[in-house]
């Protein structure tokens, strides 16, 4: 009912189970603030989890008590959220990006080029539909991004031809699915009821479909989902090793590199903020600390 993603559902259920088992399978109604604090402290001290993981566990338990058990959360004020440390993002140079992309092939390379060329997040890329790419106006619509917000980003000119070739293969795959009695794609909210034929129409198909059919965990229908994020993550890790990049590079590093390289090229920080979909400018400001010339190009007195 809350329209959370299935990943969030799985995470919340997992933390609630751990909380119940931690306290010897006592019912959550019999517990409250002290038990939650003890569980979170154990995660931090013995589990040595990060602040973000600890806060996710807390969010899960707050959801349990407020939305499931409908209990008052007066004890919430006594709990202290773990303070997330401020980290400088890992950024690749343009040469390092080129080497990593050169070490990749096929569809995973196309997806990685799209991550770097647009600054979108991994799941934003995987959830693109065919209709979201406008080749005539050179932009991509990113729907239901972080915070359930839509935004528009550029379509890199160098990716127009590869994407059009890729769409030809997507069309052939979709036609085969239709011929085999499948071809229906997941539609968000009530769109499937509102537009009964849309689920089988080409514009609504995933831009990067999975290589095989699978069973939808919610509806139980067998259909083709979007590509598995782990496939791209594995391909990026393998490419980083092959390119011998001595940095902890992940799919999200392409997004960091996109923002940093735009700022280094002289683009306005508010433009970069809009392209990234950041709500606050402070979030975008972090990239000024990892630019080739930090800040406004201040030189060290040692170099003067």
Image: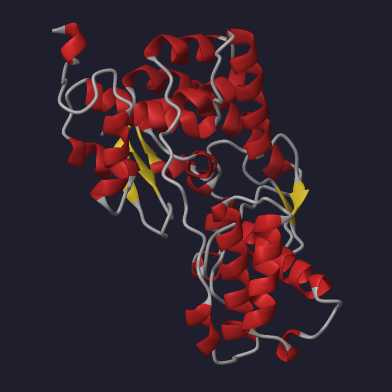
Q: On screen, 129 above or below 64?
A: above
Foreground pick, 176 / 136 = 136
Q: Please indicate, yes or no, whether residue 24 appears anywhere in the rendered image.
A: yes
Q: Residue furthest front?
A: 302
Q: On screen, 284 above or below 107?
A: below
Numbered circles on residues, count: 0
Foreground pick, 132 / 109 = 109
- Is residue 206 left or right of 238 when viewed as pictured? left
Q: Residue furthest right?
A: 24
Foreground pick, 272 / 37 = 37
Where does residue 23 sit, x and y in percent of width and height?
Answer: 81, 76
Q: On screen, 121 above or below 157?
A: below
> Residue visible at 24% across and 24% down?
294
Q: Please indicate, yes or no, whether residue 136 appears anywhere in the rendered image.
A: no
Foreground pick, 46 / 86 = 46
> Residue visible at 46% across and 12% down?
96
């Amino acid at each position: 009912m809350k329209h959370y993603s299935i990943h969030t559902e799985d995470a919340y259920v997992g933390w609630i189970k751990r909380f119940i088992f931690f306290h010897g399978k006592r019912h959550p109604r019999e517990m409250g603030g002290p038990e939650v604090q003890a569980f979170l402290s154990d995660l931090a001290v013995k589990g040595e989890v990060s602040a973000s993981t600890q806060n996710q566990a807390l969010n899960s338990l707050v959801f349990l008590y407020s939305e499931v058990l409908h209990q008052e959360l007066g004890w919430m004020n006594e709990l202290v959220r773990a303070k997330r440390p401020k980290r400088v993002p890992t950024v690749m140079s343009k040469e390092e990006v080129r080497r990593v992309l050169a070490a990749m092939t096929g569809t995973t390379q196309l997806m990685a080029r799209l991550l770097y060329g647009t600054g979108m997040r991994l799941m934003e890329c995987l959830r693109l539909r065919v209709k979201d790419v406008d080749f005539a106006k050179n932009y991509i619509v990113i729907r239901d991004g972080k915070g359930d917000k839509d935004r528009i980003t550029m379509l890199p000119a160098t990716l127009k031809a590869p994407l059009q070739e890729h769409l030809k293969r997507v069309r052939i795959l979709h036609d085969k699915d239709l011929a085999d009695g499948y071809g229906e794609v997941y539609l968000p909210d009530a769109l499937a009821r509102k537009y009964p034929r849309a689920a089988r129409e080409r514009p609504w198909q995933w831009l990067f479909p999975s290589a095989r059919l699978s069973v939808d965990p919610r509806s139980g229908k067998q259909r083709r989902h979007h590509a598995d994020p782990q496939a791209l993550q594995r391909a990026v890790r393998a490419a980083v090793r092959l390119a011998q990049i001595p940095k902890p590079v992940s799919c999200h590093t392409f997004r960091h590199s996109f923002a940093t390289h735009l700022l280094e090229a002289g683009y306005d920080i508010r433009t970069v903020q809009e392209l990234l979909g950041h709500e606050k400018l402070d979030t975008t400001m972090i990239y000024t600390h990892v630019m080739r010339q930090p800040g406004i190009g201040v030189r060290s007195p040692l170099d003067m």
